Amino acid sequence: MQNLVYFLYDKAYINITNACTNACKFCVRDIKDDVMGAGLWLEDKNVKAKDVIEQIDAAKDKIKSCGEIVFCGYGEPLIKFEEVKEICIYLRKNLPDVKIRINTNGHGSFVNKKNIVPVLKPLIDSISISLNAQDEATYNKISSPKIENAYQSMLDFAKECVKEGIDTTMSIVTKFKEDEYKIDPEKCEEIAKNLGAKFRIREWIKNGY
Ligand code: SF4
């Protein structure tokens, strides 16, 4: 069975795809098949919402006790926007007290060729967007995006989330080859604050960031 729903440190997560529009240098998926023992590499790429919902049902009580479930796995969840939508609708209806968060690289609107934020707004409680760098050149170096205009698309997405009133956090990863990538936390924080988002620093750790 594929791990579509998994648990780490008493938190519940949904792992829906291995596909991503970035290839971040610090991404654990290129290093190993699991995060803290939870095998996340999906052999079957065509994950359906109903497959995830089945695993949610099987772990309902545990998810309820976590209080929150987060879309976060080895890929970019909003590449599977239709499935994410369906799962969120199911969660809202069947586990109304469980908060829903999406961890994303912010390319969802670009990939889906439309502004998906207004659709997400009633379906989630918060969103965490990987800012990753203080400027486009540094972003391209550390995240190796496979799409054009990736940095600006991510910033525009964050702006839309704030505009829609979604609890929005922008994050960076520090302590990863600092001499090579020169991430400037202060500038990054300023960018997040200017967009009206919260800011979070995650320290890179070997077993998952
Ligand atoms: S955006 Fe996330 S999943 Fe995609 S390569 Fe970067 S760290 Fe990995």
Image (cartoon, rainbow, N blue to C red):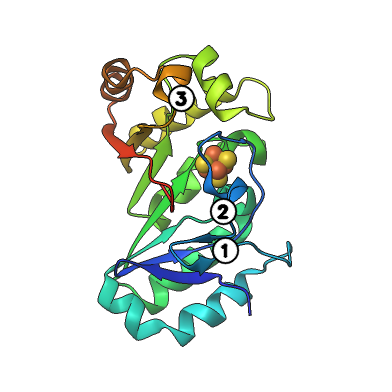
Asked if the residue at tag 3 contacts the one at tag 1, i.e. Cβ–Cβ closer than 8 Å, the answer is no
The numbered dot on residue 40 is 1
Position above or below: 206 against 100: above
In the depicted view, which residue is nearer to us: 63 or 37?
Answer: 37
Residue placed at 49% from the left, 49% from the top?
Answer: 119
- Residue carrying label 3: 155
In the depicted view, which residue is nearer to us: 71 or 122?
Answer: 71
Position above or below: 205 against 55: above
User: Residue flagged by tag 1: what amino acid is it?
Assistant: Leu
For label 3, the SS is helix
- Residue carrying label 2: 74
Residue 116 visible, this orientation: no
Quadrant (top left/top right/bottom left/bottom right) for the N terminus: bottom right
Residue placed at 27% from the left, 32% from the top?
Answer: 199
For label 1, the SS is loop
Q: Could you tell me residue 153's position as x and y percent?
A: 55, 26
Q: Could you tell me residue 19's position as x and y percent?
A: 67, 49
* Res 70 quadrant in image: bottom left
